[in-house]
């Protein structure tokens, strides 16, 4: 069964750790989304129980916009994600952003970054990484230029595990509605050495659900951005004029977010346990290969959890002088090698 996609607006340009309501209502019947998906480009099926008449939802109503990064040729992903969001998000809040393809950017396959020592697969992956960086910069610029107070940015392979119309969504909305309490809120992420502080915890449908403060993780398939952080993000991201050099130094936007940008203790990063969104296991243009089910679930590597106090978390964020020196040596050396020999891995 193929579902009708909603009307969208194509934008192809286009400090409190815990607080909240004491309500503890359960998700309504049929409120949990179940999605069956397959490898390749087949359109995943949306469980029919998923769709019901939309009612007011504190979470979705707390968002100014939902911006979906989508490559023009990935119509399969666009159909899937709009079907998933159809009865959750008001149609006027859904916006498509045409993703940037790295292979079309100035400097691709040109020296000094691409040489005869650059394997074809490495070139494609570097182009995918650069396109990802440019696409997320474009998304932040779009949110800023439209005057949105916040925006949920989704990559087109995002796969929600919950409708967020119940108590879980209410808990997140209570944070989002206080702009002083947060800067970035991740609905899905991966962090191998996961240090976090539990700020809110409730039992929902017999399972613990926690809102946590944390350092910046990797993966940007589903995150909410506060307008307070638009310009600082843009100030740190590259433009297309210097994107290859930036990519050679930092490696990826995920690595930059985790190892540099969110190391500022004044930047408040939130997430949920368990995570509410992962990525579907299909062909990834960024990886230039199919993503595995293990990668989709975030279980391809062991995660070492370390719950700590908020004071301990904040104290651990800034890099020491020795760490800064080590990073300068490590990443500076990598930049030198790439500039001299081109991308080799």
Image (spheres, rainbow, N blue to C red):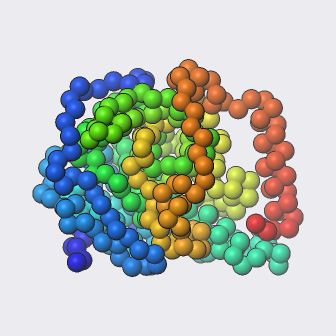
Determine which quarter of the picture holds residue 228.
Answer: top left
Q: Position of residue 99 (x, y in %)?
A: 48, 67
Relative horizontal placement of residue 32, taking residue 328 as reference (left or right): left
Residue at 22% in and 73% down? 3
Q: Is residue 336 above or below residue 342?
A: above
Residue at 81% in and 47% down? 330
Q: Is residue 338 visible?
A: yes
Which is nearer the eye, 33 or 128?
Answer: 33
Q: Position of residue 33 (x, y in %)?
A: 28, 57
Q: Say which quadrant the N terminus sits in.
A: bottom left
Q: Is residue 273 above or below residue 266?
A: below
Residue at 36% in and 30% down? 201
Q: Position of residue 179 (x, y in %)?
A: 37, 32
Determine which quarter of the picture holds residue 20.
Answer: top left
Q: Which residue occupies the extreme front position in the image?
A: 206
Q: Position of residue 6 (x, y in %)?
A: 23, 67
Q: Is residue 106 above or below residue 300?
A: below
Q: Which residue occupies the extreme top position in the image?
A: 311
Relative horizontal placement of residue 139, taking residue 2 as reference (left or right): right
Q: Is residue 155 visible?
A: no
Which is nearer the eye, 85 or 61?
Answer: 85
Determine which quarter of the picture holds residue 280.
Answer: bottom left
Relative horizontal placement of residue 293, taking residue 201 as reference (left or right): right
Relative horizontal placement of residue 321, taking residue 314 as reference (left or right): right
Residue at 71% in and 71% down? 122
């Amino acid at each position: 069964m193929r579902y009708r996609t909603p009307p969208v607006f194509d934008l192809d340009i286009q400090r409190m750790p815990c607080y909240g309501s004491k309500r503890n209502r359960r998700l309504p019947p049929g409120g949990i989304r179940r999605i069956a998906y397959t490898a390749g480009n087949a359109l995943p099926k949306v469980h029919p129980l998923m769709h019901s008449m939309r009612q007011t939802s504190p979470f979705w109503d707390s968002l100014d916009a939902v911006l979906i990064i989508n490559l023009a040729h990935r119509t399969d992903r666009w159909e899937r994600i709009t079907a998933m969001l159809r009865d959750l998000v008001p149609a006027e809040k859904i916006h498509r952003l045409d993703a940037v393809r790295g292979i079309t950017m100035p400097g691709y396959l040109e020296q000094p970054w691409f040489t005869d020592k650059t394997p074809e697969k490495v070139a494609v992956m570097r182009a995918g990484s650069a396109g990802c960086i440019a696409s997320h910069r474009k998304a932040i610029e779009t949110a800023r230029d439209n005057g949105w107070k916040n925006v949920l940015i989704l990559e087109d392979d995002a796969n929600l595990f919950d409708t967020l119309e119940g108590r879980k969504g209410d808990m997140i909305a209570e944070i989002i509605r206080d702009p002083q309490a947060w800067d970035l809120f991740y609905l899905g992420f991966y962090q191998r050495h996961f240090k976090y502080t539990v700020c809110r915890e409730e039992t929902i449908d017999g399972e613990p659900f926690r809102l946590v403060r944390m350092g910046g993780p990797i993966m940007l398939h589903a995150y909410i951005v506060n307008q307070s952080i638009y310009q600082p993000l843009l100030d740190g991201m590259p433009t297309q004029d210097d994107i290859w050099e930036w990519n050679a130094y930092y490696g990826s936007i995920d690595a930059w977010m985790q190892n540099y940008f969110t190391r500022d203790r004044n930047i408040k990063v939130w997430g949920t346990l368990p995570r509410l969104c992962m990525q579907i296991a299909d062909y990834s243009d960024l990886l230039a290969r199919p993503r595995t089910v293990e990668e989709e679930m975030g279980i391809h590597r062991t995660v070492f959890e370390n719950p700590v106090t908020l004071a301990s978390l904040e104290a651990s964020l800034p890099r020491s002088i020795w760490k800064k020196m080590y990073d300068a040596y490590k990443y500076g050396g990598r930049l030198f090698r790439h500039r001299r020999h081109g991308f080799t891995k």
